[in-house]
Amino acid sequence: MNQPFSQHVLFKTSQLEEADGPPHNPSDNPTMGEIIGARFSRRGFLQGTLAVSAITAMVSPAALVSADAARAGTASAFQFKEVEAGVDAYHHVAEGYDADVLLRWGDRLFADAPEFDPLKQSAAAQVRQFGYNNDYVGFIPLEGSSTRGLLVVNHEYTNPHLMFPGIVTVADGKVKQAPLTSEQVDIEMAAHGGSIVEIEKVNGKWRIVLDGRFNRRITADTGMELTGPAAGHARLQTKADPSGRKVLGTLNNCAGGVTPWNTYVMAEENIHGYFSGKLPEKHRESANYKRFGIPEGSYEWARFYDRFDIGKEPNEPNRFGWIVEIDALDPTAVPKKRTALGRTKHEGAESIVAKDGRVVFYLGDDERFDYVYKFVTAGKFDPTNRSANMNLLDEGTLYVAKFAEDGSVSWLPVVFGKGPLNEANGFGSQADVLIETRRAADLLGATKMDRPEDVQPNARNGKVYVLLTNNTKRSDEQVDAANPRAGNAFGHIIEIAEAGGDFAATTGTWEVLLKCGDPSIAAVGATFSTETTKNGWFGMPDNCAIDSAGRLWVATDGNNNKATGRTDGLWAVDTEGAARSTSKLFYRVPVGAELCGPLFTPDDQTAFVAVQHPADGGEDWKGHGRPSYYEDLSTRWPDFRPDMPTRPSVVAITKTGGGKIGA
Ligand code: FEO
Ligand code: CA
Ligand code: CA
């Protein structure tokens, strides 16, 4: 079958995968550059923002900062010299720090794996090598160590145009992608999922332990179990699995988490792209799949595997979109899809132990106008008996957030029999409610948000940070207090304080910590503190980390365009005292990449970051001498350095000579 040139090549990955415009119809959506250009044109800039821009043009905010800050006690909690924002082919970290590539796509995790050779790829090799497009990064200490542990890494999705040499041809100015072969589809499936790999720090530098006893690859083919209230339900049964309890693989694992009992959780996000075909007429799942955007069909897997064709296997998509839990400390453990946490385009699943010992998981559903959730376990965490915690995720209450105009938030139970979640609305049980979590939340009147990504509790200050990437489709009429900007191109961050400082509470208060974007353009409405320099502002907050000092670090997805003049990166954001909302750029990625997974070791001496899809970006980046499809960069670039993250990579950032980061 001859495929037209894939949308993967024509459009920036983040635009396609992250739904800033319907993935199935990207032509409807202007690029971020166009949106910014139209909304914040030079004319608008002059008309609306003269006062602010004049001030910022004359006096660098940086110049105003230090003396005033020192006098007023407003100094930032972060001590490092900021990186210059910009766009180029390399990565950059603050002076005095090292950013070392630790793991790249194709690196061997086992001694029997072949060395990575892009010209000799195979599924058999890929399943023993580090996967593609690293997203979530977690660290599970071994024996409490900060220098030896398991790195757990999600492999969210694949970019065939960047992976497979020769698949893209350019003739007469037209770019074409060949259909994938069956082997290439198998490589894609093997490049998905996750990696569990032992790492150790020796003489101040991290290295992987080849053949570490816990090393493991999880793929789109790994056998898994469905557990919890929806397991076994008829809507989860297929020809291959009449039990409705056994699934092959996990898809599109975006962010995730490590539980208090040191298991690894992966969040299945944009699962709609893997399914093709057409449901039988008047099929029960029609409305369910429409709400989820299924089938979107940007992957070619259904050509080789019937289970990805919803005409042939209509229930298969109901077996994806869950939170998956893996015991990384048992290489034989069967991964479990925990249905109690609902089925959405899950961004992540960060958790914290509440006052009474129950465990609270915060969950974003990353789509425009979708919701923020939390799950509270029924049972309590037992720190002295790990095995007693291993099924905590099968029983508990899922809640969805309603943010009120008065600054309060209510967590509404997504529970069968409560309110409208009943038979009259097509729900026969909690299983139905969970399979159609989004529709249940619609009926409950949850607040439609600007693409909820990471939601992160902070044990040090008792707050919860909700990162909202953007939503350029929000109209003036749809603005509310929690999503205060129409055409929200740059996103914002909400800070929740749960009632009584109890993460399990069903009420709380909230405020906007930060509206993102360039603060020197008043029409953007950004709210970075005046101490934030021209390098310090960012747009499109996506992932975040809280270090052990309780400080917030934000990673972004989508700054990679000409309008912002900066690539994505890692910014340090003050949340406390007079420095609140001050942001500083610590690290930035190569052109075309987004930054995922920031994670600090317990001693705060290492930050692991995941550089995803470097070099992607359609035709945008010709000026940088870099192709947007596979090419051997060592011959293309005269200044190529093999130590750069030129393919998806986990990078370990440490202070030169040792010490805590940003301290
Ligand atoms: Fe995969 Fe919502 O980022
Ligand atoms: Ca994102
Ligand atoms: Ca993300």
Image (cartoon, rainbow, N blue to C red):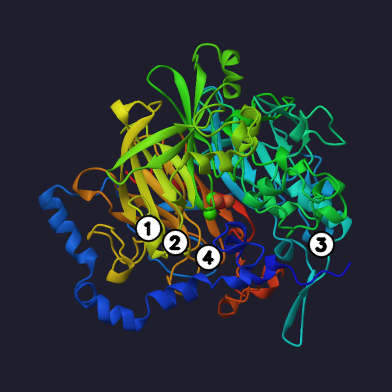
Q: Amino acid at mark 1?
A: Val
Whether residue 43 sits left or right of residue 640 in the image: it is: left
Q: Sequence order check: which comes first, mark 4 or mark 2?
A: 4
Number of callouts: 4
The percent position of residue 144, horizontal first and vertical second, equals: 50, 24
Pointer 3: residues within 10 angstroms few (<14), some, or many (20+)?
few
According to the picture, the residue beneath numbered tag 4 turns out to be 90
- Residues under numbered marks 4 and 3 in contact, where contact means CB atoms less than 8 Å apart: no
How far apart marks 4 and 3 lie (CA) works out to: 24 Å
According to the picture, the residue beneath numbered tag 2 turns out to be 474
- Residues under numbered marks 1 and 2 in contact, where contact means CB atoms less than 8 Å apart: yes
The percent position of residue 264, horizontal first and vertical second, equals: 60, 32
Asked whether 291 or 173 is in front, the reply is 291
How far apart marks 3 and 2 lie (CA) works out to: 45 Å
626 up-or-down from 606: above or below: below
Q: Sequence order check: which comes first, mark 1 or mark 4?
A: 4
According to the picture, the residue beneath numbered tag 3 turns out to be 119
Q: Sequence order check: which comes first, mark 4 or mark 3?
A: 4
Helix, strand or loop under label 2: loop
Q: Sequence order check: which comes first, mark 3 or mark 2?
A: 3
Q: Sequence order check: which comes first, mark 1 or mark 2?
A: 2
Asked whether 151 or 446 is in front, the reply is 446
Residue drawn at x 52%, y 41% is 443
Whether residue 349 sits left or right of residue 39 in the image: it is: right
The percent position of residue 409, horizontal first and vertical second, equals: 35, 38
According to the picture, the residue beneath numbered tag 1 turns out to be 479
Asked whether 311 or 580 is in front, the reply is 311
Q: Amino acid at mark 2?
A: Arg
Q: Amino acid at mark 4?
A: Tyr
Helix, strand or loop under label 1: loop
- Observer able to see residue 103: no
